[in-house]
Image: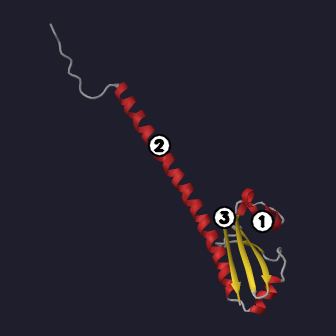
């Protein structure tokens, strides 16, 4: 007698292959998600650094000629700021203002570095090698009075 087997459902091998394919797809999506989170954090740091640089320039543009001359007389160490952006007790950025005066024209360069560069003692070391220390934002402008 010929008996036909009527099987309903999937075999164990078919189930394992299906689970493997779903796992590969989910892992690919998880990696894509992690990469997008890292890129968003990077973009947030650059946006905050650019904001801090522009904020400093706007602050300096409000100075009178006498105030700009006094500020030009300060040292680079006095114009080196450690900034805690969100007041959580963790220093987030380091902003260095480079200021050069010539008569009533002032060239201003703002360099904003990430928190990893706070431990470097001298601001002139950071400014001397921008390729190595890579500022998150750098804006240069001229202020005249």
How far apart in space, not on screen, are marks 1 and 2 (Cα)? 41 Å
Residue projecting furthest to the front: 103
Residue projecting furthest to the top: 1
Q: Pick the quarter of the image with the C terminus.
A: bottom right
**Image disc number at residue 28:** 2
How far apart in space, not on screen, are marks 3 and 2 (Cα)? 30 Å
**Sequence-first tag of 3 and 1:** 1
Quadrant in the rendering for residue 22: top left
Q: Position of residue 121 (x, y in %)?
A: 83, 64
Q: Residues within 10 Å of mark 3 (few under 14, many from 20)?
A: many
Q: Position of residue 131 (x, y in %)?
A: 72, 57
Label 3 vs label 2, nearer the camera: 3
Q: Position of residue 14 (x, y in %)?
A: 34, 27
**Residue 3 higher or lower than 23, as above or below:** above
**Sequence-first tag of 1 and 2:** 2
Judging by the rendered image, the residue that carries numbered circle 1 is 127
Whether the residues at callouts 3 and 1 have beta carbons within 8 Å, the answer is: no
**Residue 53 higher or lower than 131, as above or below:** below
**Residue 6 higher or lower than 17, as above or below:** above
Quadrant in the rendering for residue 137: bottom right
**Residue 85 higher or lower than 129, as above or below:** below
How far apart in space, not on screen, are marks 3 and 1 (Cα)? 13 Å
Element assignment for label 1: helix
- In this rendering, the count of numbered labels is 3
Judging by the rendered image, the residue that carries numbered circle 3 is 136
Q: Position of residue 104 (x, y in %)?
A: 76, 88
- 97 relative to 16 in the view: left or right: right
Label 3 vs label 1, nearer the camera: 1
């Amino acid at each position: 007698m010929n008996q036909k087997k009527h099987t309903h459902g999937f075999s164990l091998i078919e189930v394992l292959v299906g689970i493997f394919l779903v796992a590969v797809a989910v892992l690919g999506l998880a990696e894509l998600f992690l990469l997008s989170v890292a890129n968003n954090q990077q973009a947030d740091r650059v946006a905050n650094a650019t904001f801090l640089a522009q904020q400093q320039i706007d602050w300096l543009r409000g100075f009178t000629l006498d105030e700009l001359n006094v500020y030009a007389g300060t040292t680079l160490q006095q114009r080196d700021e450690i900034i805690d952006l969100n007041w959580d007790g963790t220093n987030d950025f380091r902003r260095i203002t480079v200021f050069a005066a010539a008569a009533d024209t002032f060239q201003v360069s703002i360099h904003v570095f990430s928190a990893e560069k706070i431990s470097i003692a001298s601001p002139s070391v950071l400014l001397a090698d921008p390729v190595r220390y890579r500022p998150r934002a750098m804006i240069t402008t001229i202020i005249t009075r």
